[in-house]
Image (cartoon, helix red, strand yellow):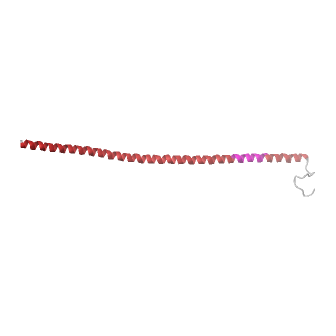
Amino acid sequence: GGGGGFFDDDPGFTDSQMLAVREQEGQVAERESEITSIMQSVNELAQVMRDLSVLVIDQGTILDRIDYNLQETAAHIDQGVVELEKAEKHQKASKMFLCIMLLAALCILMILVLAIKKIG
C-alpha cells in the first residue's frame, strides 16, 4: 500500500507494535479522563471561591451597618448629655428663682411688720 494513513493495516507493523499503540491509546484516554476530572475540580473550586466572595461582601455590609448604628448611637448619647446639662441648669435656675421670691416675700413681710409697729 502506497500513501495510506499511519494506522492502516500495514504489513510493516508487527503484533507487538500494534499492542504498544493500543496501550498508548489507552493511556491517552486515561490522561484525558484525569484532565477532565481536574477541570471539574477547578470549576468546583472556582464556584466555592465565588460563593465565599459573596459571603465576605455580605459580612462587610453587615459590619458597615453595625458601624453606622454605633455612630448614630454615639451621636444620640452626645445629644442626650447636652439635654441633661440643659435640664440641670434649668433646675438650678428655677431653685434660685424660688429662693429669690422667698427672700422678696420675707422682705415685704418685714416692711409690713415695721410699718405696723410704727403705726402702733
Q: Please report the residue visible at 38 percent of the width from the left and 46 percent of the height from the top.
A: 80
From the image, give the main secondary structure of the stretch colored magenta: helix
Work out whether residue 80 or residue 13 is closer to the camera in this orientation and state it. Answer: 80
Q: Position of residue 91 (x, y in %)?
A: 29, 44
> Which portion, as a residue range, is magenta?
30-41
Q: How many marks?
A: 0
Name which quarter of the figure residue 6 lies in.
bottom right
Q: Please report the residue visible at 65 percent of the width from the left and 47 percent of the height from the top.
A: 47
Q: Is residue 33 magenta?
A: yes
Name which quarter of the figure residue 4 lies in.
bottom right
Q: Please report the residue visible at 72 percent of the width from the left and 46 percent of the height from the top.
A: 38
Name which quarter of the figure residue 117 lies in.
top left
Q: Position of residue 104 (x, y in %)?
A: 18, 45
As drawn, which residue projects farthest toward the bottom?
3
Q: Position of residue 59 (x, y in %)?
A: 55, 46
The C terminus appears in which quarter of the rendering?
A: top left
Work out whether residue 76 or residue 16 is closer to the camera in this orientation and state it. Answer: 76
The N terminus appears in which quarter of the rendering?
A: bottom right
Q: Please report the residue visible at 75 percent of the width from the left and 45 percent of the height from the top.
A: 34
107 left or right of 23? left
Q: Position of residue 40 (x, y in %)?
A: 71, 47
11 left or right of 85? right
